Amino acid sequence: MKRMLFVLTVLLVTLSLLLAACQQQPAAPEEPQPQTTEETKSEEPATKEVTVVIGFTSSLTGSQEVSSKRQVNGFTLWMNQVNESGGIKLTDGTVVKFDFKTYDDESNAERVQELYTRLITEDDADFLISPYSSGLTSAASIVAEQNGKVMITAGAADDDAYKTGNTSLFQLYTPGSLYMVSTVDMLKELDPGAKIALVHESDKFSTGVVEGIKPYLEANGFEIVLEEGYASDTADFGPIVNKISGSGATVLLGGGHYNDGTALARALYDRQIGLKFAYLLVAPADTKFPELGDAAQGIATSSQWELAATHTEAEAANMGVEWFGPSGEEFATAYEAAFGDPPTYHVAGGYAAGLVLQKAIIDADSVDPEAVKAALNAMNLFTFYGGIQFDTSEEAHGLQIAHKMVVAQWQKNEAGELKRVIIAPADVATADPLYPNPVP
Amino acid sequence: MQQINLLLASLPDGILLGFVFGLAAMGLTLIWGVMNVINLSHGPIIALGMFGTFFIFIRMGINPYIGLFLIAIIGLIIGILIYFVAVHRVIDAPHLSSLLATFSVNMIIIGLGTAALTTSPYNVDFNVGSFRLGSTIILVTRVIAAGIAILFTGGLFLFLYKTRPGKFIRAVTNNRAAAELMGVPSTRILALSFGLGTMLAAVSGALIATFFPFSILSGGGYELKSFVIGVLGGLGSPIGALFGGLILGVLESVIPAFMETSWVPVIEFGLFVVILLVRPHGLFGAKK
């Protein structure tokens, strides 16, 4: 019996070694590198084609699913467009094309760290794009920074990640601390005596936004009558809405992400507590938000990009800043053709992440990470998405300093359909604010 | 004074919601009481009940309260199926086996649900208005849901005490071996009990969908609540579950009046641990 086992073991080991040897055989020296594929197409002016691998995680499941999927859609649209147009041609004849590697992070920060490590060490990603949401990006940024990988952070507005000495992160969104500035400016005009309730999801991003706006509210003479955080998985907002009602607030500023934002909007509508204005983060910026029906009416939000207020080449020329990429209309048309629905700011953010990387590679005339990083540091650009410039100081390296937001609100048009209109700043507004809102 | 006003405003909400929580917990506790199985597929079944309301109301245009009967029947059938597929073979095995079996069902439902429905939230845009009671706003959907929860509790009580299969269930609960000796078809009764527990979970989910947005993952939170309620009221005691639900509903509405809402789970689960330590058979459960 023991003899048979011994023979069997020897046979198995021999077989394994043979199989392993067979597997290694095709690995000839001229095989392409896993990270970049290089092909010599003709004999004389050697044209190299380099495939740059971009790594990111997306939340295919969990609380960040809606916005994360849109961000990825925007990115893939950009990538397909660049690849189909022949890639980026560098001056040495190299043609740069793009591929991506992605995993589902399940909206879970622990998964994010594990997966970004895998993207860097096993998948050899050349550049990284952040997951969606500040919390997940914060987790991913640690891994990116430890490995010295350039990470374009789309979908992550929290300021803190850029104030810890990082040098490889580059933020596309307007920082969280500035999210509500345009809304407060608008309120100052509409109702300087408004009493404010700050009710927000207790996560990194939403808390950062609220903490950022408090000094600005106080400086503008607004009274904050309630400040309350709630857990991300809160479903019953009844007690919180009662608390808002009891505080005497006339304006609500807060929210968090899509899931809690829709539940809070629904609870406000159900109870009709007489708020003049309700502003929620993120959720109302999504095209799914009107599924709430009348509960969506009058709810306002900040938006990183809206087609109706898209940035133009003429605007860039007026400011004396370089323009790059498609117009807002071209982007929106291409997106609708590819995905069947109008783009949101999360889509635009994903697309812009690719666009910024593309421009940095063109400026660097190289795919070398250090050269690309230098190009990003020097970038001062205008695209359909808006201004792009990064803070290069040691205190806040990578923080976005050129991008501006607009305030959007869901209003009913003459046909009774809910439409998201821009209500501030005044120079880009497409409609007057619904103030006081007859619904919540 | 402001806190007292807030308390008065939130209390009716908590009580009404508590009945629905109680109904959900009753499903869990019934299964535990009859067959000593902790049903970890309880949460996804609640979520399926929510989607039942969504499809019946949004896609088919049927009033959610009429659709409830259909959801109850489907819930009963799904429960019986789960029993025969996953639970029956491990019913006499150690608790870990049934725990793993129902956990597997949980993962299968969530996996299939995620693939088919994604994890993004759905909303049933159904509103039958509200009315004021002093300074308190009462939502009619919650009043109706509480009424239906009470009706189902009463129905379950009548079923268990006045019908032959109900008496069989109680007999199997008390002593399965003795019941079998008396000619009670225990396998069918166990399957029926599992079906009834699942039905109650599905119905509670269907009612919750009329007031909160939800996703396929939403059942998890209510499953946890059901455990707390089960321990509060006494696992195996359907009436205890209803009272446990009321206590939890009131706590969830009262706590935010005095402190930040983020303290709600801390206090809820603190109470869970205290009850487990001080009165492990629950407030309404009988000592074993």
Image: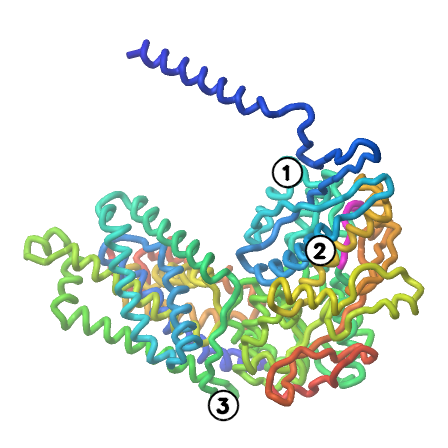
Where A218 falls versus A351 (above or below)? Answer: below
Quadrant of image for the N terminus of chain A: top left
Instruction: Residue at 83%, 32% (x, y): give it.
Output: A44
Residue B213, how many percent across, how many down? 50, 71
Task: Tell me the CA gap for discs 1 and 3.
Answer: 63 Å
Instruction: Residue at 58%, 62% (x, y): give it.
Output: A66
- Bounds of the magenta segment: A165-172
* Secondary-structure class at tag 2: helix
Instruction: State the colouring used for the structure image.
Output: rainbow
Name the foreground residue: B232 vs A203. A203
Where B235 falls versus B164 (above or below)? Answer: above
Q: Which residue is mark 1?
A: A123
Q: Is residue A228 visible?
A: no
| Labels 3 and 2 positioned on one and the same chain | no
Q: Which residue is mark 3?
A: B134
Q: Which residue is mark 2?
A: A81
The three-letter code of the residue at mark 1 reads Asp
